[in-house]
Image (cartoon, grey):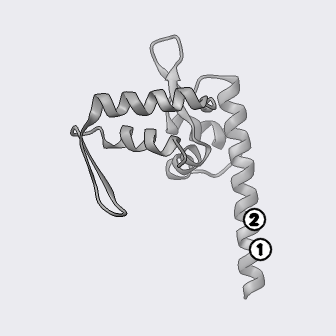
Amino acid sequence: MAGRSAQRMLSRDAGRSDRERRIREIIARRPVGTQEELAATLRQQGLAVTQATVSRDIKRLGLVKAPSGDGRARYVLPERPSPVDVLRRLRLAIDEYVLSIDAGEDLVVIHTLTGCANAVAEAVDEMAW
């Protein structure tokens, strides 16, 4: 039983790696603006994928949306920001979105404007403390 389980995991990981490689190739070749558009392209290449699978792949690859020049957004691989850019982004997020910060012994609570917690959390995460 354990052998079959391990084989399934290896097979799943190989499928994921192939899918992610193809996603990188697709978005490098042409603008892709939606998860469904990306899923349809992968299906045309013979892969059985769902929008949910593509969504997880996008998250794992760290894809971000950027302007494509025609007024639409497209998926791109993130650029590796410099440490100065990361710090600048954190300062901007704090200045723009943070209402207050409460700190205890081993806990920090950051109060943000409604809908802005994610942006602050991403800026904090990028610091890689």
93 sits left or right of 124 in the view: left
- Return the residue nearer the eye: 115 or 111: 111
Q: Please say if 7 is above or below 19.
A: below
**Residue 122: horizontal and vertical position, in percent?**
44, 41
User: Disc 1 designates what residue?
Assistant: 7
- Return the residue nearer the eye: 19 or 99: 99
**Residue 121 occupies quadrant:** top left
Alpha carbon separation for disc pair 1 and 2: 6 Å
Q: Amino acid at mark 1?
A: Gln
**Residue 82: horizontal and vertical position, in percent?**
61, 28
Residue count near mark 1 (Cα–Cα under 10 Å), binned few <14, some 14–19, many ≥20: few
Q: Amino acid at mark 2?
A: Ser
Q: Are marks 1 and 2 in contact (CB under 8 Å)?
A: yes
**Residue 39: horizontal and vertical position, in percent?**
57, 41
User: Disc 2 designates what residue?
Assistant: 11
- Return the residue nearer the eye: 59 or 100: 100
Tag 2, which secondary structure?
Answer: helix
